[in-house]
Image: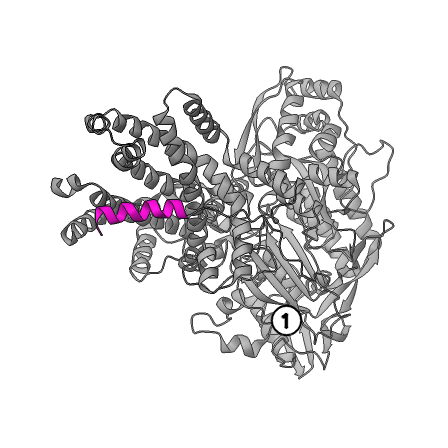
Amino acid sequence: MHRRQFLQSTSAAAIGATAPAVFTSASAQSRSETLLIVSESGPNNLDVMGVGTNVPGYEASWNCYDRLLTHEMKTLPDGSQYYERDKIKGELAEEFTIEPTSATFKLRKNATFHDGAPVTAKDVKWSLDRAVTVGGFPTFQMSAGSLTKPEQFVIIDDYTIRIDFVRKDKLTIPDLAVIVPAIMNSELCKKNATASDPWALEFAKQNTAGGGAYKVTRWTPGTEVVFDRNDTWVCGPMPKIKRIIWRIVPSAGNRRALLERGDADISFDLPNKDFAEIKGEGKLSVISTPYTNGIQYIGMNVTRPPFNNPKVRQAIACAIPYQKIMDAVLFGLAKPMFGAPPDKATEVAWPQPHKFNTDMAKAKALLTEAGYPDGFETTISFDLGFAGVNEPLCVLLQESLAQIGVKTTINKVPGANWRTELNKKEMPLFTNIFSGWLNYPEYFFYWCYHGSNSVFNTSSYQSKPMDAFIEGARDAAAAGDQVAYDKDVKAFVDLAFTDIPRIPLYQPFINIAMQKNISGYQYWFHRRLDYRAFVKA
Amino acid sequence: MMKLLLDRLLTTIPALIGVVVASFLLTRVLPGDTAAYFAGPAATPQAIEQLRQQLGLDRPLPEQFGHYVVDLAKGDLGKSLTTGQPVLSDIKARLPASAELTLFGLILALLIAVPLGIAAAVRQGTVVDHACRAIATAGVSLPVFFTGLLLIYVFYYILQWSPAPLGRLDVFTSAPRGVTGFYLIDSLIAGDGETFRASFSQILLPGITLAIFSLAPIARITRASMLSALSSDFIRTARAAGLGARTIIVTYAFRNAMLPVITTLGMVFSFLLGANVLVEKVFAWPGIGSYAVEALIASDFAPVQGFVLTMAILYIVLNLLIDLTYRVIDPRMRNAS
């Protein structure tokens, strides 16, 4: 190429390229049977049993696979749909019987996978074997219900399978209705398995090898997932929506704009402030439901001074600006877990509010009594991954603690590093959230307060009486002894509130905003969307 | 020409080795525990440990590096945990998205900035010059996410002229068959006017956002190099010889002022490609910048390493192209080497 030619061609290009002004809206296509969902992040794996599957991945699995069992739904007084913890029904199982040492499941004979193959007992066994064998999160979730080895799953005939119990455990049956024990197309998976990947993890990561109500027909990671209805689904009422398009829109402001303009049907995770405003405007329907068995709390490391002194912990509990946090951080979108009336009796329930309230004089007195009349210095840590709530919360706490002489610096921990920091159990003062899929008080307490010191016992709390109450409640539940169970649950709740190693703040809400013509939202323990019940008018 | 090309390519090898080593070490030094992050919110320490073994993160660093280099030699950049895909296919899918947006923005900026810069230099000290300065200052001082959100608010939310900011295409249009990966070009190749219109109206707002930001350096450099060209001896001679204003400015002065402008363009392009994360976030654009940032937040090593390596190669190629362009534009360059 020569200089003059080059110069001529570049100047010609510069003159020729005049941009025509086309500002047109997308062509209006029929959208009545399509649902457009926008949220901040998407799945990294379509298989809940995969390595490191993220939470949006659970949603894909939930809608594309069936399980043996599922929960009934109930309608709350405000009209919203909520899963029934104690009412379990068959999904792939047409009927099931529970005996003291085993449970037997009869499969639906007309159920098929997406490729048309019938669902048989060997698929069920293969899938459950997979869940207890692959390791990592799925295997641990299965073990939470005492489902630990393949020998427990016995094929009786093509359409009957028996699950043997290794011990009496109240959580075994509910654990079969969580996301993990999804029933997969074993022949299809085996065809795509390799010697180094016998459970076809690579194949199932990219493809939905199940028989659920929806199947993934297009997936562009980080951009969108498209689900199409499985028109031969028999395990429940036929879903109304033919196609679900799930688009990833990272900017919260845009998710709101898309909703308000009517371009998106459902937004799954908007900041509290946006939800509060949308609710106030009343142009969209907004549903807020408290997380089951979930609490945001202030934790303290009880192994070191000053927080090894219960008086100091109580002083902090009196110095937290609870109501300010509710109003300014959450915009009222949470269920308070503080300020119960002093004469209120402890309930057999969890979560329930404690009796502390903001009382600076009392906080100061308790601190003086504990030997810190001039306060002390410490750091407050929080997870930057949830900075939207955590940061203002910690700033309010910092201001309030300064009034009783407790000087704090705020330590922001990046999301990827938060779990590592929790594991070290060295942070003196921090805010965190815990919620369990299985909604039982003793389940929550086992993870968070028991002396076995799991990663979620973030305060490193150790107490012999506490351990005894928790184990007592678990044994009583397995044995069906309601009186002993009630007594132990009340006892551990009382002890948790007197010793107060962690101070519950509130039960967070899961917030869903959608167009007025959309109905059928159901709240599930996993807190993700169930597409099967949505209706678009 | 070939010899120069070979020479230049050889000198890039040490730089590439440096990039591979540095990106590997840097991702390992960063705080954060990949296994703990991906084990999920309900994982036990045993579950985290198992995941660490599955990912090979429990092995000593030299061994991990060895595996990385061997895979790299086979063209395997590893797997992303955030998207679950091979990094290479992620980058292949996302680099064209970023490149298309960046080029679009840059061409837009060029169309405005170069005439503006020339006008400012020719009419130095007049209203045009001051306007050029004001526009440049405003463009560079408005953060891109702000300009982006403002444009969305005005043109999408209030006026409804622009389609929903949902990335490269709206929900109901499907992507054209991939030839270049640039939707605008691919849809033209396929002769699909509908898709072209759809992708053009999607790219317009983010493109304008980027253009506003990159206007400033281009306009300022054009003005400065035009000024020095206009004050040089050969322009005085040309004026004395009675040549027309147009010939003097476009044919003589601007051609000589082009070198620094091209250099700046190269810099602005490579800078924008990696740095338009915010624009990508605001417009849900599936580009490479936001990909790398998301991976970084999750301590997901492979995509970060892949991103750094791709960027390094891109810079090298770009610089090479710019050098070659110099030689085409300026005969002195050819003699100098």
Q: Can residue A222 be seen in the rendering of this structure?
A: no
Picture coordinates of residue B256, whole percent (x, y):
25, 35
Which residue of the protein is positioned furthest toward the front in this rendering? B242
- In the picture, measured across the screen, residue B209 lies left or right of residue A83, that is left
**What residue span does the magenta drawing correspond to?**
A1-16
Q: Examine the rendered structure and indicate whether residue A464 appears above or below residue B197.
A: above
x 59%, y 55%: residue: B170
For the residue pair A456 and B292, the one nearer the viewer reads as B292
Q: Is residue A4 magenta?
A: yes
Q: Which residue is mark 1?
A: A183
Dominant secondary structure of the magenta stretch?
helix
Q: Is residue A40 magenta?
A: no
For the residue pair A260 and A280, the one nearer the viewer reads as A260
Dot 1 crowding, Cα within 10 Å, few <14, some 14–19, many 20+: many
Picture coordinates of residue A138, whole percent (x, y):
58, 61
Which residue of the protein is positioned furthest toward the bottom in this rendering? A157
> Which of the 4 image quarters holds residue A226?
bottom right
Picture coordinates of residue A148, whole percent (x, y):
60, 66
Q: Amino acid at mark 1?
A: Ile
x 82%, y 47%: residue: A348
The chain carrying label 1 is: A
- In the picture, measured across the screen, residue A470 lies left or right of residue B182, that is right
x 65%, y 45%: residue: B160
Q: Examine the rendered structure and indicate whether residue A124 appears above or below residue A296.
A: below
Mark 1 residue element: loop
Which residue of the protein is positioned furthest toward the top in this rendering? A374
x 71%, y 55%: residue: A525
Q: Can residue A13 be seen in the rendering of this structure?
A: yes
Q: Examine the rendered structure and indicate whether residue A273 appears above or below residue A472.
A: above
Picture coordinates of residue A74, whole percent (x, y):
83, 58
